[in-house]
Amino acid sequence: MSEDLPQQFWQGIDQFNTGQFYACHDTLEALWIEATEPEKTFYQGILQIAVALYHLGNHNFRGAAILLGEGSNRLQRYPSVYGGIDVDELLDQSTDLLKTLQQTQLEKIASVKLTEEQALTLPKIQRVGDRG
């Protein structure tokens, strides 16, 4: 399956993992528009999580929470590993972040800087198999 995904997909994954969430959105959206199922919904799920993290960086916590939920719901349809991606790990990390956002007072979240030493752990996409 991972051999079938275009290089542009892996570029989007690299952008996601380096915190370039807006660029990831642009990269994956171009693929999503042209894709057919089952890849279309897969791309959309990752894209929505990327946009959620972009919103989080801009302190749009409501938008972040909504898109984390929507992206995660789309990815739940896929097996544990799909397209060379550890879907379960991405879902676990995204769900943990969503729970944190829902349980933390907005004032506390607003004071958090999104850096490597942050209190909020941002999801990373893990490659599996020959791409890992």
Image: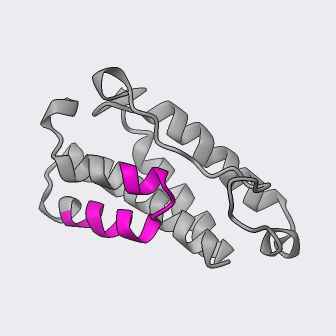
**51 left or right of 106?**
left
**Residue 2 point in image, percent of width and height:** 22, 32
What secondary structure do most residues of the magenta stretch adopt?
helix
**Residue 90 point in image, percent of width and height:** 51, 40
**Which of these two is toward me, 21 or 31?**
21
Start and end of the magenta stretch? Answer: 14-30
The quadrant holding residue 29 is bottom left
Which residue shows up at 62% across the image and 64% down it? 65
**Residue 25 point in image, percent of width and height:** 36, 66
Q: How many marks?
A: 0
**Which of these two is toward me, 20 or 38?**
20
Which residue shows up at 38% across the image and 50% down it? 14
Q: Is-magenta flag for residue 12? A: no
The quadrant holding residue 75 is top left
Residue, far top:
129
In the rendered view of the protein, which quadrant contains the C terminus?
top left
**90 left or right of 31?**
right
**Residue 67 point in image, percent of width and height:** 52, 64
